[in-house]
Amino acid sequence: MPAQSTAGLPPENASDIQPVERILHDLDAQWSKAAAAKNLEQTIGYYSDDAVVLPPNGPSATTKEAIRKLWQDLLASPGFALSWKPTRVEASKSGDMAHVSGTYEFSINDASGKPFNDRGKYLEVWKKQADGNWKCAADMWNSDLAASAPATAEKK
C-alpha cells in the first residue's frame, strides 16, 4: 500500500492533515483492524524487513521470524482483543520517514481465565520503502496502568 505523511496535526482535523500524514494515519487504522480481526499475515505485513518490535515486559523482536512469533502468540491468546488509534502523525521534511503515536486498548485472559484489560500508548517509526510503500520499522508500546508491586519473599 503506498503511503504519504502529514505534519503532526491531530487526525481529528482530517481536512488539515497533509497527504503523507493522512496516508499513514489511514494505514495505521487499517493495521489496527487487521490485528483486531486476528489476521496474522496482514498484521505482520505492515512491518519492514528490518523492523524491530519492543513490547513491554519482554524481549525485543528483531527478525521477521521473531515478529511473527510475537504476533502469533498474541493473536492466539484466550480473550485477545486489541485496538489502537493514531492521535499524532508527523513526517520528516525529506518525506521518507515518519512517526505515529496514539493510544491502545488491549484485553486478554490471565492465567486463571479472568479478563485483564489494559490501555496505554504507542509509538511507531515508519519508513518509505524503495517501491514507494510505507512500512513500520520500529514499534513499541506501554501501559498507562500502574505497575504491579513485586511479590515479597516469604520469611523463613
Image (cartoon, rainbow, N blue to C red):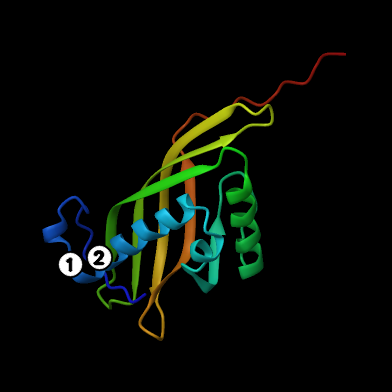
> Where is residue 90 drawn, in percent x and y?
27, 62
> Where is residue 54 drawn, in percent x and y?
55, 55
Residue sitting at the far right: 156
Corner quadrant of residue 64: bottom right
Corner quadrant of residue 108: top right
Residue 78 numbered tag: none
Pick whichever, 72 or 95, lies toward us.
72
Q: CA distance from mark 2 to mark 1?
A: 5 Å
- Residue to which mark 1 is pinned: 18
- For the residue labelled by badge 1, is the local secondary structure a helix, a strand or a loop? loop
In the picture, measured across the screen, residue 79 lies left or right of residue 100, that is: right
Q: In the rendered picture of this protein, how many numbered marks are placed on residues?
A: 2
Q: Amino acid at mark 1?
A: Gln
Q: Amino acid at mark 2?
A: Glu
Q: Residues within 10 Å of mark 2 (few under 14, many from 20)?
A: many
Question: Please, is residue 31 above or below residue 126 in the view?
Answer: above
- Residue to which mark 2 is pinned: 21
Residue at 12% x, 60% y: name it: 16
Question: Please, is residue 85 above or below residue 31 in the view?
Answer: above
CB under 8 Å between callouts 2 and 1? yes
Corner quadrant of residue 26: bottom left
Residue at 33% x, 77% y: name it: 2
Q: Quadrant of the C terminus?
A: top right
